[in-house]
Amino acid sequence: MFPSGIIHGKQDLQAMNASSNGYAGAGSGRGHMERSGPLHRKSVFVMGGARSGKSAFALKLAESIGGKRIYVATAEALDGEMDERIGRHRKERSASWETVEEPLDIAGKLSGASTGSVVLIDCLTLWVNNLVSSGLDDGRVVEEALRLSEAIKGSRSSVIAVSNELGLGIVPENSLARRFRDLSGIVNREVAGACEEVYFVAAGISLRMK
């Protein structure tokens, strides 16, 4: 059960705003809606647990597409452990990758990518953490997720987004952890709906879900 005060995704956000802007959403139509704007080459969402092999799978997939390679890193080296993790991921990438560090505005970075590029975003879970840590409330975090979803749909580049699946374990005991888990689930759901392909990775094995 979601804790009180959590915005539960696109429909709830539309309902929340209906009284102020006169707009009543007709449902998200995830996976089946007609996409407007310029057609993008490929959009893929990859999720899995910690050390599942999801980043390695996404990297291999991205390098099979071709074009200019842009790695959007959402992690910040705030301590020694995270600095080590960032270094390990950096070593896994070849010199052909351009790395862009962006903890917050990944939709803006995606919109600015050149036509025909392949953009790998790793990862959305840390991005949600950054948004929450910056002081955004739940509604604003969902708005950012919807903005990213629209950027994916309208991108002229191939887009691969990586995220953790946090909802398969026990319910966290504290409210902040439950909030983070719930918001991560909402972000995953919205981005998965915006992408043409969705993969779940466990124990180094990928399963196509969409």
Image (cartoon, rainbow, N blue to C red):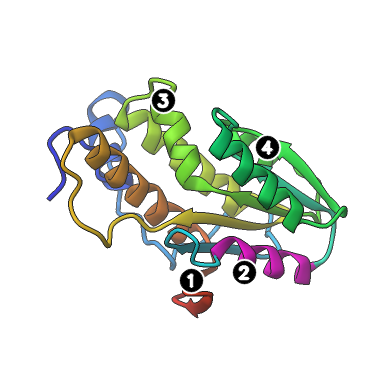
Q: Nearer the viewer, residue 115 or 74?
A: 74
Residue 40 placement (x, y as % from top left): 68, 59
Q: In this view, does 15 lie above or below 204?
A: above
Alpha carbon separation for disc pair 3 and 1: 27 Å
Circle 2 Cα neighbour tier, 10 Å, few/some/many (<14 / 14–19 / ≥20): some
Quarter holding residue 146: top left
Circle 3 Cα neighbour tier, 10 Å, few/some/many (<14 / 14–19 / ≥20): few
Magenta span of residues:
54-65
Mark 4 or 2, closer to the camera? 2
Q: Name the residue under label 1.
A: 201
Q: Mark 1 is on which residue type?
A: Val
Q: Mark 3 is on which residue type?
A: Ser
Q: Is residue 133 magenta?
A: no
Q: Name the residue under label 2.
A: 57
Quarter holding residue 59: bottom right
SS for dot 1: strand
Marks 4 and 2, the one that precedes in the sequence:
2
Alpha carbon separation for disc pair 4 and 2: 22 Å
Q: Name the residue under label 3.
A: 133
Q: Is residue 195 above or below residue 7?
A: below
Q: Could you tell me which residue is drawn at 44 percent across and 76 percent down?
A: 209
Q: Could you tell me which residue is drawn at 70 percent across and 69 percent down?
A: 60
Alpha carbon separation for disc pair 2 and 3: 29 Å
- Kindly give the residue lying farthest to the right in the view shown: 95
Alpha carbon separation for disc pair 1 and 2: 8 Å
Question: Mark 1 touching mark 4, by CB under 8 A?
Answer: no
Question: Mark 4 touching mark 2, by CB under 8 A?
Answer: no
Circle 1 Cα neighbour tier, 10 Å, few/some/many (<14 / 14–19 / ≥20): many
Q: Is residue 3 above or below residue 30?
A: above
- Kindly give the residue lying farthest to the top in the view shown: 135
Residue 207 placement (x, y as % from top left): 48, 79
